[in-house]
Image (cartoon, rainbow, N blue to C red):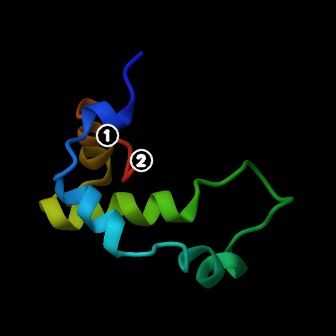
Amino acid sequence: MVTIEELVPEDHLLRKIDQYIDFYFIPEKVRSFYSKNNGRPSLDPVVLFKMMFIGYIYGIRSERKLEQQIHEKDCPPFS
């Protein structure tokens, strides 16, 4: 079985970003926009932010293209 740790090199830009930026302030900031008991479960706001951050870094403006790139590269946002 292959793991993300094996697929993404240790010196990869996304690993460095994840090492130096603590993204876990985000849920507190967006909590009022989410409902736990209304509708389908939402995407984790940290994952969504990381995806948009990746798009910004790599100049991918289309969310659809961004999603395709992440799936093709087999690299979930910052694991």
The amino acid type of the residue labelled 1 equals Cys
| Residue identified by numbered label 2 | 79
For disc 1, the neighbor class at 10 Å (few under 14, some 14 to 19, many from 20) is some
Q: Secondary structure at mark 1?
A: loop
Q: Is residue 2 above or below residue 79?
A: above
Which quadrant would residue 13 be assigned to in this image?
A: bottom left
Q: Is residue 33 left or right of residue 5?
A: right
Q: Position of residue 12 (x, y in %)?
A: 18, 52
Residue at x 51% of width, y 64% of height? 46
Q: Is residue 51 above or below residue 79?
A: below
Q: Position of residue 33 (x, y in %)?
A: 67, 76
Residue at x 61% of width, y 79% of height? 30
Residue at x 55% of width, y 64% of height? 45
Q: Is residue 20 left or right of residue 44?
A: left
Name the foreground residue: 65 vs 52: 52
State the mark number for residue 75.
Answer: 1
Residue at x 25% of width, y 31% of height? 72
Q: Secondary structure at mark 2?
A: loop
* Residue at the extreme top of the image, as rendered: 1
* Residue at the extreme front of the image, as rendered: 10
Q: Is residue 26 above or below residue 6?
A: below
The amino acid type of the residue labelled 2 equals Ser
Q: Position of residue 79 (x, y in %)?
A: 41, 47
Name the foreground residue: 12 vs 35: 12
Q: Mark 1 touching mark 2, by CB under 8 A? A: yes
Which quadrant would residue 15 be assigned to in this image?
A: bottom left
Q: Number of callouts in the render?
A: 2
Which quadrant would residue 35 be assigned to in this image?
A: bottom right
Q: Position of residue 43 (x, y in %)?
A: 58, 53
